Image (cartoon, rainbow, N blue to C red):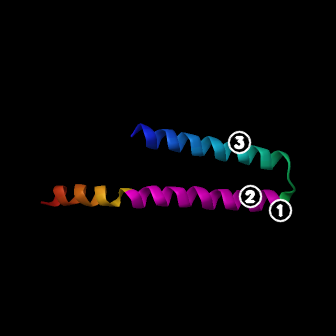
């Protein structure tokens, strides 16, 4: 659990640092493009984490329904 929490905090801090540097040193178009890429990376990371948890969710739902 602590590994996943550390990973989440580390990734979010990395996103914040990269986002702030892009906002400070970029044109308007590059900021929009970078924002879209950052959002896609964040959504992809969340989806990967959810997919990794699916077997555990299935086991929990099976216990709940039986």
Q: Which callout, 1 or 3, points at the residue further toward the start of the chain?
A: 3
Residue 45's tag is none
Residue 29's tag is 1
Q: Position of residue 25 (x, y in %)?
A: 86, 48
* Magenta segment includes 38: yes
Residues under numbered marks 2 and 3 in contact, where contact means CB atoms less than 8 Å apart: no
Q: Position of residue 50 (x, y in %)?
A: 42, 57
| Mark 2 closeness class: few <14, some 14–19, many ≥20 residues within 10 Å | some
| Mark 3 closeness class: few <14, some 14–19, many ≥20 residues within 10 Å | few
- 9 horizontally vs 55: left or right: right
Residue to which mark 2 is pinned: 34
- Quadrant in the picture for the N terminus: top left
- Quadrant in the picture for the C terminus: bottom left
| Mark 1 closeness class: few <14, some 14–19, many ≥20 residues within 10 Å | few
Query: Which residue is most to the left?
Result: 66
Q: Which callout, 1 or 2, points at the residue further toward the start of the chain?
A: 1
SS state under label 3: helix
Eye-nearest disc, 1 or 3 = 3
Q: Residue, x 78% and y 45% (percent of image)? A: 21
Eye-nearest disc, 1 or 2 = 2
Q: Quadrant of residue 27?
A: bottom right
Residue to which mark 3 is pinned: 17
Query: Which residue is most to the front?
Result: 3
Q: Which stretch is magenta?
A: 30-52
């Amino acid at each position: 659990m602590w590994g996943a929490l550390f990973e989440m905090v580390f990734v979010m801090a990395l996103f914040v640092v990269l986002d702030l540097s892009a906002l400070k040193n970029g044109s308007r178009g590059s900021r929009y493009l970078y924002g879209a890429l950052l959002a896609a990376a964040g959504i992809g990371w969340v989806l990967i984490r959810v997919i990794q948890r699916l077997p555990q969710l299935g086991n929990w739902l099976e216990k709940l329904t039986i």
